[in-house]
Every structure is written in structure tokens, then in C-alpha cells.
Image: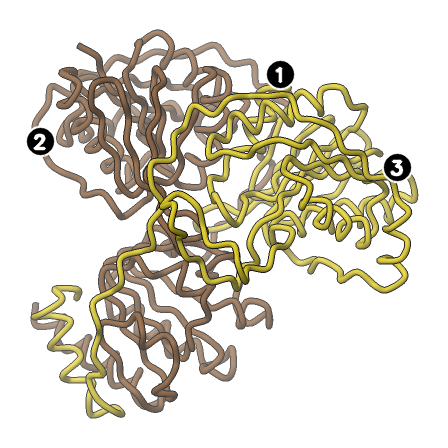
Chain colours: A brown, B yellow
Amino acid sequence: MANVLAFAEQRDGQFGSAAREAVSVAARLADASGGVAHALVLGGSTVSASVSDLGLYGAERISVREHDALSEYNPEAWVPIVVEEVRSGAYEAVVFAATTLGKDLAPRVAALLDVPLVSDVTGVELSGGTLSATRPVFSGKAFASLEVDASPAMVSIRPNVFPAVERAAAGEVSMSTPDIDPSSLRVRVVARNDASEGSVDVSEASIVVSGGRGMRDPDQWSLLEGLRDALGSDVALGASRAVVDAGWRPHGEQVGQTGKTVAPKLYIAVGISGAVQHLAGMRTAKTIVAINRDPDAPIFGVADYGIVGDLFEIVPRLTEEVSALRSTD
Amino acid sequence: MNVIVCIKRVPDTEARIRVDGSGVMIEKTGIKYDMGPYDAFAVEAALRLREATGEGEVALLTLGDSSSQETLRKGLAMGADRAVLLTGDVSLDGLATAKTLASELDASNADLFLFGIKSADDDQQQVGPMVAALTGRPCVSGVSSFDVDGATVTCQRQVEGGSEVVEVDLPAVLCMTKGPNEPRLAALKGIMAAKKKPLEEKPASENVSRVRLKALSEPPARATGRIVGEGADSVSELVRLLREEANAI
């Protein structure tokens, strides 16, 4: 019997879909190896208050490492704790979420444990000690099927791809306070600038409203903000490379090969022609809508639904109708 | 300050990727190769640092076959001082690559090691932090720009939903992402000068891949979509489809 560990990421003491998805995948892999799923949480001194929810997604045991120095991510403080936890648990596999934090943390842990890491997978199975995974390569222009024999096998999973599955588990919490000497840390976070209050990152949102050069002017983004707000709370703005390079939008919103790869439930491309680099970044979205005046734009080649025409007429109408629909829900 | 920038030769981001008959390789015919776009940000950052301080050396390091000489020459033409090509196989096991690079970097006297945050082919985003862990150096990833003051580097770091200012002690590893400084194009003078700059080629220390590539496939074609209609009058039908057919809103 070998167990599987999920690294459950929290931000400001809250667990998002990244943590639930990682725990769900760990529970599924543990079924295959005849073990159970454990979750590991690192955070500030109040993080244990919200960990019990992880049990709802299949974590039999939840290890919580609390310390004021862990309230924000700092690889110098976090890596040794995670390495020790993985080592002591003799896990068959370890699952991280391929978030900004997970992509920074997981490779360091893997290197110190001397095991390979398969990053950003969109499919993963465990069978007889072999981990099989599928992951996008060339920014989603191709997919690689891989096998790893290593103990533990380490993967990070692409956000929004794996379902968070509710399944009751003991969720037994074991808490401890590690020894950390903050003065010994060679990396220090000295400031944090949050984007506007309550905004969702484009790589994590379940709906993305993305604008391109067809928007004509950065001031026109109020149109997309209106549509974003009408669609609900888990919605982010995205942007094409052209408008980021023009300085209209921040790089954090860029979708595509030199930006973020996204896999939302719904992607609405407004005034984006669909360069190959952009398509690579969003083609795994579940449903794609394109609004563009050029019927030959490549974006229509990947869109499930398209409207050809003037976005300055179409987007306000879409905002209005979505608002009307949602107000009757 | 001496800086080493690790770069990789990858298909140009505009390349169309097709799987060849082997089922595990891409069709190389017709593909243009170039320095990875994030690596170019790293090279640019290193050159700006040298220009700002007026001293130090910028060296380039890569693992690959002899075709990577061309990519190194491009970096030399941008302004780097010298280049090292470790000849060997590159696999999908980032840790094998990291070990090869780490053994070279361990022997160097550089203070700063720059990587692009990810390669544009494997996209694993892991080699930089792995090298840092293997060499015992602190590391910041997702850096869009940085300033060096004495033995401390102050980094602008992109994170979900915002940005951070992070300090790190030298010697350090930084993994660069897109930032305010667009990579420079090599001028003719630089291209001529690059031909005379040192490019050392030597066999890489061998680290066997523990990741097996079973198959490479093209992404499943998306089911053919439909044009719902033209103009704002089509919006009602779009909203109905998104609600009833796609279950997306």
C-alpha cells in the first residue's frame, strides 16, 4: 500500500480550485495504488481554520505546517518543509497544482529528492509503480505521452483541467509548527501589489473575456469589463500579444505562447484574429466564442460559436442579454 | 559582475508543429529555430546589467547538438562575450538537463545565473529552479525586471493576480519572463563581431533521462464550430446556445 500526497495550495488562508483539484487527483491515483490520499498545507498561523474542507475531496490526512514566516510563499522557507514531508511519508506519487507557486516549488522539491518532475499535465494515471502522463508541449501545439518510473513520481497538474470531485474522507488534521529562522532566508518578499480588488487571474478563471487589436483603443476595455461583470465573479480579462506589446494591457493578462496558457470553461475572443501563438494558449478551453469583423480570421477555425460583425455593437448587446439571463436565474 | 545565461534552441513560436512518421518526433522540415523567447529576455537583462555597471562578463550556456551554435552566435551578436555549447541529448527529463547544467555552473565564478522561465518547446518551467536547488543557490522565478545593489538583487516578480517585489542574495538564479525590456535585435556590427567571439564546444556530462516519451500527438482537432450569424442580432441565439447547448453560462 502506498499513499499519494497532494500539495494543497492556499492563498491568504483560502483554498481555491487548485487545492481541490490536486487533492481529487491524489485520491484517484491513491485508489490505483491501493493507498490513500494525504494533503499537505503550509501557511500562516491561522491557516488550519479552513483545512477541514480538503477532507471533502478525499484527503484522509491533512498535514498542516503553520508559521508566521509561511503566511506568504517563500521558496527558501517552504522547500525544506515539503521535501521533509515527502521523504518521511514514503509516497508513491506527489501531486502539485501547476500554478505560479506550484511551478516554482515543485521543481526544487523534485531536484532535492532526485526524482524527475512531469509539469503541467492534462492527464495522469498510476499503475504498478509507473506514472503515465499526458502534457502539452510546444505551448499546446502538440501533446506528449510520457512514462516515469521514480519513487515518488512527481507531477504538477494544469489548473481547470481535472475535476474537483467530492468524496468523503476522514480529513484527520495533524498540525505542527516548523522551526524557521526568517533571518536566514536568502529570498525576501518585500512588497506585494495586488491587481484590482477581487480580480481573478486569467490562468485560473472559469470564464475569460479576451480582447485584441480589434478593440482599437485601450479606453474601449470598459466594454469588456462590462461583459466580465455580467458573466459573474469567476471571470477574468485576457489579452492578445498585440495589445500587450502596444502597452494597452498588462503582460499578466496575455494569453498565448509568451503569455499564459488557459483552459477555462468559456473563452470569449473579442477582436482577436487568432495568431498561431494565441491559439496555442487557449485551444484547450471547453467552449470558445469568437467575435470578429473578418469572417476569414483564423480564430473562427477553433471557435465553437462565432459572430461576424462589429464588436462595438455586439459586445454591448451580449452584456445586456447575459445580464438579463442571469438576473432570472 | 559575471553573468551566465542558459538558453535553448527551440522552434520559432510561429512554427506549425507536425508529428513525423516516428510518432515521437516533430517534422523538422520547414521549421525555423531560434533562441527561446524567454531566453531572449534573459539575455537582454544580462546585457543591460553589464551596460549599467560598465563591467563584468556575459556568458551563454546551452545543452544541445551542434546546430545550437547558430543560436549561441545570435546571443553573441546581441552582445554576449562568450558562449559554451555542451553537446549532448536533451530529453523531457528536466532534472537530467538541470544536472548537466549544474555541473558546469558549479565550476564557474559567476554571481548571477539567468534562465528564461520556460522553453518554448517542452514548456516544463522547471530547469532553472532545479539548477538552483542542485547548486544550493537562492532562486526567484517569473522575474520581469531586476536591479542589483551590492550583494542584493531586487526583482519585480509576476504572480497570480498581481506582482511582488522580491529581494534575493547573490549569488542567485533568476528565471526571467516577459518584462518592460524588449530583447534587442543584433545589428550588423554585432553579427560581424560575434564571428570572432569565443564559442567553446565540449561534451556534456551524461545524465540519463528517467522520463520516457511514448508518443507525440497533434492536439485533437476541435469539432467544427459554426458561425451563429452576423451582427448584434445574432446575440440572442449565441446566448441561447451558450446556456442550453454548451452549458457555459
Q: Residues within 10 Å of mark 1 (few under 14, many from 20)?
A: few
Q: Which mark is residue A312?
A: none
Q: Residues within 10 Å of mark 2 (few under 14, many from 20)?
A: few
Please report contact status of discs 1 and 2: CB closer than 8 Å, yes or no: no
Q: Nearer the viewer, residue A60 or B50?
A: B50
Going from N to C along the chain, the mark reached first, 1 or 2, is: 2
User: Helix or strand or loop: what does disc 2 sit on?
Assistant: loop
Quarter of the rendering containing residue B87: top right
The residue lying at 19 percent from left, 33 percent from top is A24
Q: Residue B35, how many percent across, how many down?
A: 65, 51
Quarter of the rendering containing residue B151: top right
Q: Specify the amino acid type for callout 1.
A: Ser
Q: Residue A53, how many percent across, how many down?
A: 18, 31
In front: label 3 or label 2: 3
Q: Which mark is residue A184?
A: 1
Question: What is the spatial separation of the Cα atoms under label 3 and label 1, in whole angstroms?
Answer: 28 Å
Residue linked to disc 2: A167
Q: What subunit carries mark 2? A: A
Q: Nearer the viewer, residue B170 or B210?
A: B210
The residue lying at 18 percent from left, 40 percent from top is A164
Residue linked to disc 3: B56
In front: label 3 or label 1: 3
Q: Specify the amino acid type for callout 3.
A: Gly
Q: Quadrant of the C terminus of chain A?
A: bottom left
Quarter of the rendering containing residue A230: bottom left
In front: label 1 or label 2: 2
- State left or right for residue A12 relative to residue B135: left
Q: Quadrant of the N terminus of chain A?
A: top left
User: Helix or strand or loop: what does disc 3 sit on?
Assistant: loop
